[in-house]
Image (cartoon, helix red, strand yellow):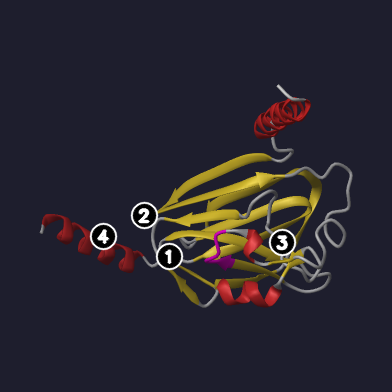
Amino acid sequence: MTLLKEVFVIASLFLLQFSASAQVMPQPSSSCMVMRTVGFTEVTIAYSSPGVKGRTIYGDLVPYDQAWRAGANGATKVTFGTAVKIGDKNVRAGAYSVFITPKKDGEWTVHISSAGSVYDFMNRETNSIDMKALAEKDVATASVKPMDLAETQERLKYDIDQAKDGNIMISMSWGDKKVAFMAEVDPMAIMKSMEESAKKSIE
């Protein structure tokens, strides 16, 4: 074997070993999932949970006036088992990405997006999300007032709760803030959809 071939083989083995090691390295932000059925609607949220680690979150790690993936690693995903209404938009049953645009003053914006990946919107020059491109993929948005937490939420987390009126309340807590938005359900529309599905299965 020539010297050149030996070098090539050694380099190839090194790259294979490095690649295998990289694949088994755990992500610094753990993967989480929360699921709940509210009425007839099953809701699932899959996200990565970063820690505060003594950092200033909003206005620093998460800049104001820029959309954020509402978690870490890939985009946060929410799946609705039935159609819901968010803001003034009807949202079909299915899976969507969640983004949040925090503001220093005033209400924050929650984006429910049809995009599959956060990288679809990345501006390579600024390494931030292109707001115009994101807006084009918005299925619905909700304006929400952030709430101050009495104690720091070290690990980002999502909760799904049933509101008093039977609608779905989804909240995200991290650092010193909590934001929550409502997904409204229409029981009559759900019953009608279930009846139509039952008829189709019989036919």
Disc 2 and disc 1 in contact, CB within 8 angstroms? yes
Tell me the amino acid under the disc marked 4.
Met
In the picture of the structure, the residue carrying the numbered disc 4 is 194
Tell me the amino acid under the disc marked 1.
Val
Distance in Å between CA atoms under marks 3 and 4: 36 Å
Q: Secondary structure at mark 4?
A: helix
Q: Quadrant of residue 116?
A: bottom right
In the picture of the structure, the residue carrying the numbered disc 1 is 185
Which quadrant is home to the C terminus? bottom left
Q: Residues within 10 Å of mark 4 (few under 14, many from 20)?
A: some
Horizontal arrangement in the rendering, residue 73 relative to residue 159 (left or right): right
Tag in front: 3 or 4: 3
Distance in Å between CA atoms under marks 3 and 2: 30 Å
Dot 3 or dot 1: first in sequence order is: 3
Distance in Å between CA atoms under marks 2 and 1: 9 Å
Q: In the displayed orientation, state which residue is furthest to the top.
A: 1
Tag in front: 1 or 4: 4
Tell me the amino acid under the disc marked 2.
Phe
Dot 1 or dot 4: first in sequence order is: 1
Q: Which residues are magenta?
A: 112-116
Res 20 seen here: yes
Distance in Å between CA atoms under marks 1 and 4: 14 Å
Q: Secondary structure at mark 3?
A: loop
Disc 2 and disc 4 in contact, CB within 8 angstroms? yes
Question: Residue at (19%, 57%) from the top-left corner?
Answer: 198
Distance in Å between CA atoms under marks 2 and 4: 10 Å
Marker disc for residue 40: 2
Residue 105, position as x, y percentages in the image: 82, 73
In the picture of the structure, the residue carrying the numbered disc 3 is 68
Dot 3 or dot 2: first in sequence order is: 2
